[in-house]
Structures are given as C-alpha cells and as structure tokens.
Image (cartoon, helix red, strand yellow):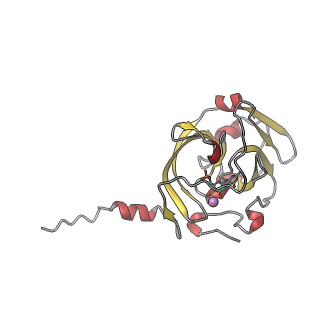
Amino acid sequence: MAIVNRGFVGRRDRDARRLPPGQYTTLDFPVLSSEPTPAVASAGWMLAVQSADHKAATFTWEQFQDLPHEDVTTDIHCVTRWSKFDTRWRGVSFDTLLRALPWEPAPFVMAHCHGGYTANVPLADLVDGRGWIADTYDGEPLAAEHGGPARLLVPHLYFWKSAKWVRRLRFMAEDAPGFWEERGYHMYGDPWREQRYS
Ligand SMILES: Nc1nc2c(c(=O)[nH]1)N[C@H]1C(S)=C(S)[C@@H](COP(=O)(O)O)O[C@H]1N2
Ligand SMILES: [Mo]
C-alpha cells in the first residue's frame, strides 16, 4: 500500500532548507579565534558604548545583568562552512540595550573586543530582535573560549560578526571594516547570499 501525503516534509528536506549554500552541519561547537582566549573576569567586566559624536555610556557587569535578558535558539553559520543548528543562548537584545542609552545611536556599529578583534555590523541588523549580547550558552555562563563573559550574537550573518569578548560598542555614521573585513571578508556577510569575501 502506498502512502501518499503531499504535505509531509521529511527532516532531511527541512534541514536542507535551513542550511545556507556551501555549508555543512556539525554537532560539535568548534572554537574559532584569531587570538588566544583572553582572561576576562565578569567581576571587572564593563561594556563601554560610544556615540558617533563621542558621547559615552557604560554598563558594569551588574548593570548589564539587571537589563532584561531573553532566550534565543538559533542556527549559526561560520564562513569556514560549518553550521550548527538550534544553538541555545541567553542575552540582552540590542533593542533593550538601545533603550538604556541616554543618546541616539548611529547607523553602523563597530564591536571592539578584548584582544583587539573588531567586527562591523549595520545597526539595522542588530535591532528588531536580530542581535544580542549573549552571556549564557546552553544554560551555562558563556565559556571563555566561546567569548565569555559576553559576546555579540548576530546569527543571521556569518558568525565572524558575532564578536567574542566584546568590551566596547562604537556607533559610526559611516560603515568601516573590522578585523576580517580588512583582510578581504565581506563587509556585510549574509550566508544566504554567500557573501564570504568581497
Ligand atoms: N574576539 C573575537 N571574536 C570572534 C572571533 C575572533 O577570532 N575573535 N572569531 C569569529 C569567528 S570567525 C567565528 S566563526 C566565531 C566563532 O565563535 P566560537 O569560537 O564560539 O565558535 O567567533 C567570531 N568572533
Ligand atoms: Mo568563522
């Protein structure tokens, strides 16, 4: 007896549709760092935020913890071609962070990290529930090698944009290249359009 059900979509088909072109899925969580893991304690951690006209705001670890956090389950895509489905994070959305700022943001953001790494992201890609500063992974404080105490999480762009060990967010009127963008990676980095290199 043949079973015909045109509405049925198998798991492999569904998974294939969530996999951007040129990617494969992994169940591990690879560590990709261009620098040695810096020792950053949450105790002295601070997030500095700078406006395009050099106004400052800071969040201590305690102030950051007091901001509303949300859970995020999402797929992530590294430009070296691994993707990982259903990663579970917790963090503060940029929507929340922006509401806590005493001044207006500018259209581009440069994330600066302990160790010197930088990544540029348009503000439009961080708001409306698309960008977070994550401090928790899989229910545990974010491990140092994955960017703990806190990192960017911008899962709809290649994962190099999700800067680990973030310490400063600098708003900019114009876009500017970060660490990998200066080395030939794409300024925007959409995995669905395979924007790996410029
Ligand atoms: N500070 C910093 N952030 C970084 C990187 C880095 O080298 N330094 N690598 C990026 C790249 S290329 C990827 S794929 C992800 C890897 O995150 P993971 O090590 O937690 O998998 O971090 C991104 N953020
Ligand atoms: Mo990456």
Residue 83's place in the image compared with 194, above or below, is: above
Residue 154 is at least partly visible in this image = yes
Q: Quadrant of ligand 2?
A: bottom right
Q: In the displayed orientation, state which residue is furthest to the left.
A: 1
Looking at the picture, tell me which residue is in the foreground, 119 or 121: 119
Counting from the top left corner in percent of width and height, residue 190 is at 61, 63
Q: In this view, does 13 lie to the left or right of 128?
A: left
Q: In the displayed orientation, state which residue is furthest to the front.
A: 36
Q: Quadrant of residue 149?
A: top right
Residue positioned 66% across, 41% down in the render: 150
Looking at the picture, tell me which residue is in the foreground, 106 or 147: 147
Residue positioned 12% across, 67% down in the render: 1
The C terminus is located in which quarter?
bottom right
Counting from the top left corner in percent of width and height, residue 114 is at 76, 46
Counting from the top left corner in percent of width and height, residue 176 is at 79, 60
Residue 68's place in the image compared with 7, above or below, is: above
Counting from the top left corner in percent of width and height, residue 72 is at 53, 44
Q: In this view, does 169 lie to the left or right of 91?
A: right
Q: In which quarter of the image is residue 81?
A: bottom right
Residue positioned 76% across, 59% down in the render: 179
